[in-house]
Image: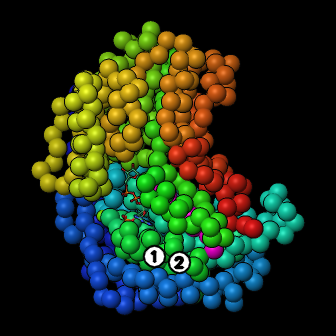
Amino acid sequence: MIFDYAPAPESRSVVRLRENYDLFIDGEFTPGKDGDQMSTVNPADETELARFTVAGASDVDRAVAAARRAYDTVWSRMAGAERGKYLFRIARVIQERSRELAVLESLDNGKPIKETRDVDLPLVAAHFFYYAGWADKLAHAGLGPDPRPLGVAAQVIPWNFPLLMLAWKVAPALATGNTVVLKPAETTPLTALVFAQICQEADLPPGVVNIVTGAGETGRALVEHPGADKVAFTGSTEVGRQIARSVAGSDKRLTLELGGKGANIVYDDAAVDQAVEGVVSGIFFNQGHVCCAGSRLLVQESIADELLPRLKDRIAKLRLGDPLDKNTDIGAINSAAQLRRIRELTDSGAEEGVERWSPSCDLPPSGYWFAPTVLTGVSQAHRVAREEIFGPVLSVLTFRTPEEAVTKANNTPYGLSAGVWTEKGSRMLWTAERLRAGVIWSNTFNKFDPTSPFGGYKESGYGREGGRHGLEAYLG
Ligand code: NAP
Ligand code: MG
């Protein structure tokens, strides 16, 4: 039976957009010194949502100075239990405003409301609640009797989970007594700017959180600022490398969370329908704009003929379109630049001889869209097996033995995530022990929780975010 879905759009009226957004420095919204602005668009229809300020070097300077002042005079001296109260308050305001934030995130990023509402926002609040609980217990975190904050944290985040990446960075930094200057991505600055309003609403002392918007140059000025004691970056390996170089030789502490090319291994004894669901959510969740996406499916040869048709049937039922429609599974690609990158890499696969399949699917007339795509006949040498596509494109490889599965899974410069699908516990453990990946899911995928550390091996970066381990990155 084929079901038709009537559109069920979430209302935009909960969001009150300003025409222009200033920088957030020392507890106030303040214009940039140079007066430069950029705009952010809704990737689902390319309309402009708002204009925002490009922070220049002197604005970054002001923000770092405000963070330093707040650190020295207020935040590092405050009892942990008091800091915790602010974090609990922020968490509660996020919950109260979660519908507004979910709609705004979908507008600015292009991801489905189903995800912002049910995944991003609950996790954002959970991160603040979780780290609020640590603020007065740092002496019991296993990091010594009196662990000390580092100072001013310079934080740069990407566009794929804008508010969630902010929460991953800001919550542990504040809980441990550090102050923050954060730069959101240029295509998704809006939820960070509403977060600045939330800091005001929660009466957070001025300068504890500062938000500087702008492009890569603003990010560079921030991470290279001599007043930063700690740099935390999530984004591409290329920019991560530049930052590592610029920080080398200074006494700044650095954590990097970079790309991935995660393997999702399906053994012949796996529950096939469950594995199909996991493979689908592993690569199509958030349009595949996920550093830990299961972008390489490794399927045991003996069940490939059974699994692939079922996988395609399932993919053909995914609904692509308006991110604000509650039925939507796949939203818009975040930017024209990202769409170009996805097209270029996927086309390279076709040129190298891999077979390309997408379900028939009508793409909306404006906006940035890419149909879910499966590439088969992929070998390890193909670019689509080696490079991160960061889009809704699954590369399928096969294997015969568990040893071959592990060798192929580990044959990547990255090491962020992996999945293992099998009904046999011993096989799952055998495989997990041999995979070089920071997070390994078994019979599930893309499960996140603030109590669980997250981070990579090799070119996926270093340092852990989340859980007790996440405190260590902000304590000396
Ligand atoms: P990116 O350039 O690394 O951007 C990440 C953040 O760093 C953004 O806020 C960006 O600002 C900023 N930035 C850019 N150049 C900088 C510099 N020299 N110094 C300091 N900060 C700088 O990533 P992207 O161009 O948006 O995406 C490119 C690829 O990166 C994707 O295709 C994907 O493969 C990977 N990626 C990975 C993740 C992840 O979660 N690990 C997230 C996003 C992207 P602007 O936004 O203004 O450029
Ligand atoms: Mg945008």
Disc 1 is placed on an element classified as helix
Compute the Cα span from label 2 to label 1. Answer: 6 Å
Please state which of residues 151 and 293 is positioned toward the viewer in this rendering: 151
Quadrant position of residue 327: top left
Judge whether 449 appears above or below 276 on screen: below
Q: Give the left or right position of residue 154, taking residue 142 as reference.
A: left
Judge whether 176 appears above or below 270 on screen: below
Judge whether 401 appears above or below 325 on screen: above
Please state the horizontal and vertical placement of residue 409, each as a whole percent of the image. 51, 28
Q: Residues within 10 Å of mark 1 (few under 14, many from 20)?
A: some
Residue labelled with disc 1: 221
| Location of ligand 2 given as a quarter of the image | bottom left
The extreme front residue here reads 249
Quadrant position of residue 54: bottom left
Please state the horizontal and vertical placement of residue 408, each as a whole percent of the image. 50, 25
The reply to whether residue 100 is in sight is no
Residue labelled with disc 2: 225
Which quadrant is home to the N terminus?
A: top left
Q: What are the residue bounds of the magenta stretch? A: 229-235
How did the renderer colour the structure? rainbow
Taking the spot 54% from the left edge, 12% from the top edge, the residue there is: 401
Q: Give the left or right position of residue 100, taking residue 335 as reference.
A: right
